[in-house]
Amino acid sequence: MSKDKNKKKPAGVTLIELTIAIAIFSVVMLIALDSFLGVLKFNREAVQKQSIQDHTEFLFSLMGREIRMARINYGDYDGNASCDAYFGATNKVPLNDTYQISADHKELFFQNYEGLCVHYFLWTDFDGYIGLKVARYNPQISTEIGSDWVLPRDITVTGLYFDKQNMFDLHPTGPTRPPAVKYSITLRSAIWDPSEIKIFNVIAGRNFEQF
């Protein structure tokens, strides 16, 4: 029996050892969680940017053809078929010009190849959503066809700037250049963490080549 009394009992885990183990485990888990959240955020941003790029391609396609084929205001159209009344005295396209922009460079006006008066502009709805809209007006029948959002509501426009170049604009550094519209637009995804992309584009008018 004396031998049994001399046997060592199994050592237990002390409170200090348990605390250290929990601390190490917590640090490892925090590092792993931080890495996981970083990967998740990166994936979300990639998805959002890809979505914005997809909508940007649609935007280029939609605006590109219409702006490229805009009519030049030669002043030989029927008075009832011009866009002057719709655009107003401030924003009407001057004689022999193709495009007009507003004083703040946030609106674009022109007459497209179908004879419709086209107006691109920023609009804020009752929910505070800011997006790009396009309105078209048929001067032949004095009717607005309607205005539509160019992009879906999960894409917010946080910046827009139009600039124009008409065929007979004076260029001190060179000869007359073809009409063109330059614009920059900043798009932000409204899903998850905001992801923003600023894009630039130049669209040269080609309808003048037909005359």
Image (cartoon, rainbow, N blue to C red):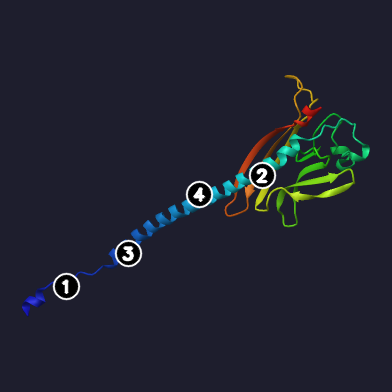
Q: Name the residue under label 3.
A: 19
Mark 1–mark 2 contact, CB under 8 Å?
Answer: no
Q: How crowded is mark 4: few (under 14 residues within 10 Å), some or many (20 or more)?
A: few
The quadrant holding residue 167 is top right
Give the position of the N terminus as an image quadrant.
bottom left
Residue lying at the far left of the rendered structure: 2
Q: Name the residue under label 4.
A: 42
Q: How crowded is mark 3: few (under 14 residues within 10 Å), some or many (20 or more)?
A: few
Could you tell which of marks 4 and 2 lies nearer the N-terminus? Answer: 4
* Disc 1, SS: loop
* Disc 4, SS: helix
Q: Can residue 60 be seen in the rendering of this structure?
A: yes
Q: Which residue is drawn at 85% across and 32% down?
A: 73
Could you tell which of marks 3 and 1 lies nearer the N-terminus? Answer: 1
Amino acid type, mark 3: Thr
Q: Nearer the viewer, mark 1 or mark 2?
A: 2
Q: Residue at x 71, y 49 (%)?
A: 131
* Disc 3, SS: helix
Q: Nearer the viewer, mark 2 or mark 3?
A: 2
Cα distance, mark 3 to mark 1? Answer: 23 Å
Cα distance, mark 3 to mark 4? Answer: 34 Å
Q: Name the residue under label 1.
A: 9
Amino acid type, mark 2: Phe
Q: Nearer the viewer, mark 4 or mark 1?
A: 4
- Residue 113 x/y as whole percent: 80, 37
Q: Which of marks 4 and 2 is in front?
A: 2
Amino acid type, mark 4: Phe
Q: Which of marks 3 and 4 is in front?
A: 4
Amino acid type, mark 1: Lys
